[in-house]
Image: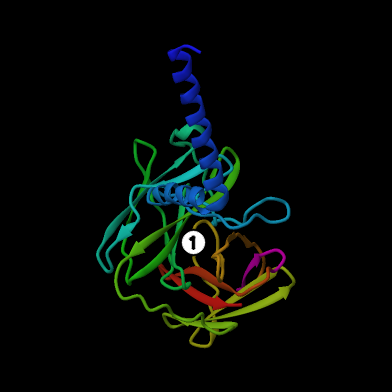
Amino acid sequence: MSAGGRVAAFAALLAAIFAGAALAGAALDPDGAAAEREHAAGQDAEHGSAHASAPSADGALPAGLAGAQDGLRLVAAGTRFQARRPGRLRFRIAGPGGATVRAFEAEQARRMHVIVVRRDLRRYQHLHPVQGPDGAWSTRLTLPDAGVYRVFADFRTAGERHTLGTDLFVAGNFRPLDLPAHSNSASIDGYDVRLAEREPGELSFLVRRDGRAVTDLQPYLGARGHLVALRAGDLAYRHVHPIDGPGPEIAFETGASEAGRQRLFLQFRHRGRVHTAAFTR
């Protein structure tokens, strides 16, 4: 064999040895590849993506658990805030290929709803960002305490409704609060609100002030009320539309109940102000 042939054969032998070592290493340390994927996911998370939980039997994730779903992705410009200091939440919705989605359809009087809540289901906020010329969305945001907050972008585009999520981080001394006990009543800003289940999958709320039912609620987001349900633990998200009907109650079709406890956030408007009543079920 010529000298050139011997060199080529030796190089091929080395390549085979290294390939075998790599395969063995992957078999002995499978987390090596996983760690690399986690690092990439962490880089994405800093730009707005989120880890998703396991899909349901039909393959669909509950709303809000993923930062990317159905060909769309929430891309946040930043995820770190300082407690009690006004900041700005900026994000865009990217479509297939990464292009910014610009066309959105109104859903309950707004083209984009943003829900922010701390992961212990406290510090709830409902915001309506403004879309800029570049297609990105922006809104002022003040996070009152340290902790990890979940952001839900709730929108409709191309005739389909979507909810994508990401986490925001506020450094400091974080003391998570226990989920309040189950209750069918809540008091807020001088109003007493009573929750009742009319029938399976239908909830109604009666707002009272000074012991009397409030019969002159004002429209909020084009309806008499607004309800968001978040499941404790994974924060699976549901945004429920009200049912028109007689009487002072605000009714919602919630569908079949899910396993686990939920935190319900009811918003209503009266005398020019929006009030938020929270319940645990």
Image coords of residue 160 (percent x, y) = 60, 43
Residue drawn at x 68%, y 68% as measured from the top left: 258
Image coords of residue 159 (percent x, y) = 60, 40
Which residue type carries mark 1?
Tyr
Image coords of residue 272 (percent x, y) = 40, 67
Q: 10 Å neighbourhood of mark 1: few (<14), some, or many (≥20)? A: some
On the image, which quarter does residue 260 sit in? bottom right
Could you tell me if residue 247 is visible in this image?
no
Locate residue 117 relative to residue 52 in the image: left or right: left
Residue at the limit of the structure toward the front, as seen here: 1
Residue drawn at x 45%, y 35% as measured from the top left: 98
Locate residue 259 relative to residue 218 in the image: left or right: right
User: Is 252 one of the magenta-colored residues?
Assistant: yes
Residue at the limit of the structure toward the bottom, as seen here: 211
Image coords of residue 242 (percent x, y) = 61, 62
Q: Where 206 falls versus 133 (above or below)?
A: below
Which residue occupies the foreground of this view, 280 or 173? 173
Q: Give the range drawn in magenta.
A: 247-257
